[in-house]
Image (tube, rainbow, N blue to C red):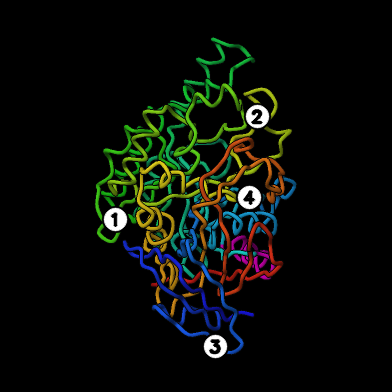
Amino acid sequence: MNNWLISNARLINEGQILEGDLRICRGRIEQIGAGLKGRARETQLDARGRYLMPGMIDGQVHFREPGLTRQADMVSESRAAVAGGVTSYLDMPDTRPATTSARTLAEKFSRASGRSTANYSFYLGASRNNIDEIRRAAHSQACGVQVSMSGSDELLVEDLETLATIFRDCPLPVAVHCEDNTILAENLSAARKRHGKSIPARSHATIRSREACLSASRQAVGLAREHGTRLHVLNLSTAGELALFEPGPIADKQITAEACVSHLYFIEDDHDELGNLIKCNPSIKSDTDRRALRQALAGDRLDTIATGHAPHLLAEKTIGYLDAAAGMPLVQFALPVAWALVASRMLRPEKLVEKLAHNPAQRFNIRDRGFLREGYHADLVLVDPNKRIDINQQAILSKCSWSPLAGRRLPARVAATWINGRLVWRESLLTGLVAGEPLSFQR
């Protein structure tokens, strides 16, 4: 059934935690209150002792479809996502072919339709020669335009004139991966001279350095201020970059920034145990950087939390540093990992929900999602803070079949997930319902 009465929940929404009930009817939140009475043909669930919150809107995932489906696809990764409390995702353009045109965007939407368990939208990727596609981009086609300032493929954009044109002319939010390609190349050359072909995994933080991140972030923020761009800087990883961003409510901001759970959870010392399993771009940095990122979330200098979910086959990770792929699977445990910030008293639950759900909805102008409000889509997550998760005891739902969190214990469990009012995950099991819809956006 798709009509629900969830009673006695601790509702987390818009800066408050209130005891109450929530009714779902026809895929939407119909009523929020106290002492709501059950109706005929309505499934009732007693949520006593647990938190009910809007689901996470993950602003950065790499679900690998089309072209890289040996690693992941929209079916497997959306299933993993709802297990982790992610109800909507924004997928990156680094597919094969890259998503750089209205045609390739339309193909991705077609692939997701009827197959994605979670709600979805897709970035249009910027390249050196698709400015006309970017100018024509509309929210009916994409959630935003993604720019990568590092790399070696067609999605690399580092020329200042091209960047300035994109920032000036793009009608959608611009999401930027900020690392300076020149500095990265110099650092890699130095590491090769020092270690030869046997570069240790721990060197990744030195190669993908703080200086490379700060240089590119400074340039992106400067361009956005010059051209009035709605800029969202992806996966901040260093303390030094934080000074580029203003604290305060997201509604007042032209320029916003994101932290990924990888940079909020791991530190570079973890390379000694996990090696290339936690190799990602930008790199995991020091405990000092991690503490600064956590404090910036609490102080509203950082606005959103994403996963940066980027799965690879285990065989692509357990090889030498130079050949090992960058990225790791994280969506299945997204909310439990983020809840560690609550368990350690770094963030209040209502502040965490702001970063996971409210702010992504506002940054990307997503219509009728991201809040517990009557009339909004019923994208909901029930969190049990009294039950921990031992990762080794969980079936890995991502197609790559491994997790960098193996052997770790997380402080909360996703007890249930609803997508558009349909229960897709309950008590560690998928229900089999495929309920995802394309996201729509305010003009």
| Residue in the image at 69% along x and 54% along y | 73
| Residue in the image at 38% along x and 33% along y | 238
Could you say which is closer to the camera, residue 332 or residue 50? 50
Few, some or many C-alpha atoms within 10 Å of disc 4 (few <14, some 14-19, many ≥20)?
many
Residue type at numbered disc 4: Thr
Q: In this view, does 392 lie above or below 375?
A: above
Residue type at numbered disc 3: Arg
Residue 68 in sight in this render = no
Contact (CB < 8 A) between labels 1 and 2? no
Residue stretch in magenta: 102-116
Question: Does label 4 or label 1 sit earlier along the sequence?
Answer: 4
Question: Does label 3 or label 4 sit earlier along the sequence?
Answer: 3
| Residue in the image at 57% along x and 44% along y | 154
Residue behind mark 3: 39
Q: Is mark 2 on a helix, strand or loop?
A: loop
Residue 313 in sight in this render = yes
Q: Is residue 150 above or below residue 422?
A: above
Contact (CB < 8 A) between labels 3 and 4? no
Q: Position of residue 234 (x, y in %)?
A: 43, 46
Residue behind mark 2: 324
Q: Residue 353 carries which label?
A: none
Question: Does label 1 or label 2 sit earlier along the sequence?
Answer: 1
Q: Where is residue 248 in the image (x, y as percent from the top left)?
A: 24, 52
Residue behind mark 1: 254
Q: Distance between the residues labelled 3 and 4?
A: 47 Å
Q: What element carries label 1?
A: loop
Q: Is mark 4 on a helix, strand or loop?
A: loop
Residue behind mark 4: 95
Q: Is mark 3 on a helix, strand or loop?
A: loop
The residue at the far bottom in this view is 40
